Amino acid sequence: MPGLSVVFHPGAVEEAQAARQWYLARSPSAADSFLAELDRGVESVVLAPERWPLFVHGTRRYLFQRFPFQLIYRVKGDRIEILAVAHGRRRPGYWKIR
């Protein structure tokens, strides 16, 4: 599926920024590592969007390796929609209305 574009839901952008700020307040290197992991996740999803397991409501989920976060996304036509950069232990399923 080469050539897929990536679109972030505004809520997912806010979540990524809030997580980065939280890590930055504790450790600049942790904040950098979080962003690197986010980038790796998006890159992995773009390269093989069907590789990650089906989740709920037609979405798929990529789990971060070092941080308790997950990318919730769906493939729609020629694009990947990132619906959430969700913390794995907070408010499960809040993003379903996106």
Image: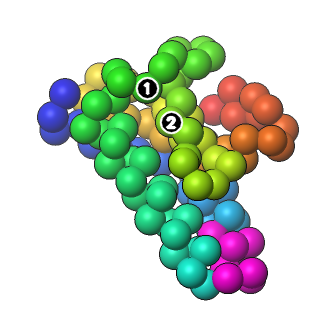
Numbered circle sitting on residue 4: none
Q: Quadrant of residue 77?
A: top left
- Residue 58 appears at what percent x and percent y? 52, 15
Q: Is residue 87 above or below residue 53?
A: below
Residue 40 belongs to the span the image colors magenta:
no
Residue 41, x across and y down, in percent = 43, 47
Q: Is 95 positioned to the left or the right of 10 in the image?
A: right
Dominant secondary structure, magenta: helix
- For the C terminus, give its image quadrant: top right
Colouring scheme, one of rainbow, by chain, secondary structure, one colour = rainbow
Amino acid carrying label 2: it is Tyr
SS of the residue at dot 2? strand
**Residue underneath mark 2:** 62
Q: Secondary structure at mark 1?
A: loop
Is residue 23 shown in magenta? yes
Residue receiving disc 1: 52
**Apparent side of residue 74 relative to residue 90 in the rendered image (left or right):** left
- Along the line of sight, the residue nearer the viewer: 4 or 52: 52
Q: Are marks 1 and 2 in contact (CB under 8 Å)?
A: yes
Question: Which residue is pictured at 44% across the width and 65% down the height?
Answer: 36
Q: In the rendered view, does 66 fall on the left or right side of 87?
A: left
Q: For the point 55% across and 47% down, which residue is it?
A: 64
Residue 49 seen: yes
Residue 52 in the image: state x and y as whole percent.
43, 26
Q: Which stretch is magenta? A: 20-27
Please, is residue 4 above or below residue 60 in the view? below
